[in-house]
Image: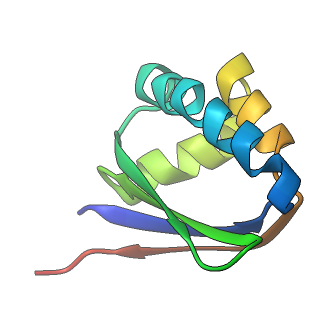
């Protein structure tokens, strides 16, 4: 069953360009290193807050990814641009 991850984080306005520049390498590393990674969409909520909507093939794939953390240069560089991790939630898609 597909799992959706919702990660809310903040980025200072002066770091947004850095975060967006780091995003393609992070996504490439996710595709190469994370089993079950399907897609990711970034949603800007306001000047500092963002939500990353990530689709995983299943809950186990998301759990495995969380255990890996920032284990590749592209993922680590993206994470380094974030100021605060506000919330991480996940749910299984039904229907």
**Camera-side residue: 53 or 20?**
20
Q: Where does the C terminus fall, quadrant-wise?
A: bottom left
Q: Quadrant of residue 44?
A: bottom right
On the picture, is 80 further left or further right than 47? right
Res. 26 in view: yes
Residue 70 shows in the view: no
Q: Is residue 55 left or right of residue 88?
A: left
Q: Please tell me in which quadrant of the rendered image residue 67 appears.
A: top right
Compare residues 71 and 40 and report the one nearer the observer: 40
Residue 42 in the image, given as x and y percentages of width and height: 50, 58
Q: Position of residue 83 (x, y in %)?
A: 89, 58
Q: Position of residue 56 (x, y in %)?
A: 36, 52
Q: Could you tell me which quadrant the N terminus lies in? A: bottom left
12 or 6: nearer the viewer: 12
Give the residue drawn at x 82%, y 44%: 81
85, above or below 87, in the image = above
Across and down, in percent, residue 21 comes to: 64, 32
Placement of 46 over or under 42, stated as above or below: below
- Above or below — where is 73 with respect to 12? above
Residue shown at the point (86%, 52%) measured from the top left: 14
Q: Which residue lies most toward the left here?
A: 95
Residue at image location 56% in from the left, 42% down from the top = 64
Please tell me which residue is depicted at 52% across the width and 29% down the height of the picture: 24
């Amino acid at each position: 069953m597909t799992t959706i991850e919702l990660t809310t984080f903040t980025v200072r306005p002066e770091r947004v360009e850095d975060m967006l520049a780091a995003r393609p390498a992070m996504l490439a590393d996710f595709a190469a290193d994370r089993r079950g990674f399907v897609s990711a969409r970034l949603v800007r909520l306001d000047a500092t807050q963002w939500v990353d909507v990530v689709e995983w093939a299943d809950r186990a794939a998301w759990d495995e990814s969380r255990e890996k953390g920032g284990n590749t240069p592209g993922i680590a560089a993206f994470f380094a641009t974030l100021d605060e991790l506000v919330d991480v939630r996940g749910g299984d898609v039904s229907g």
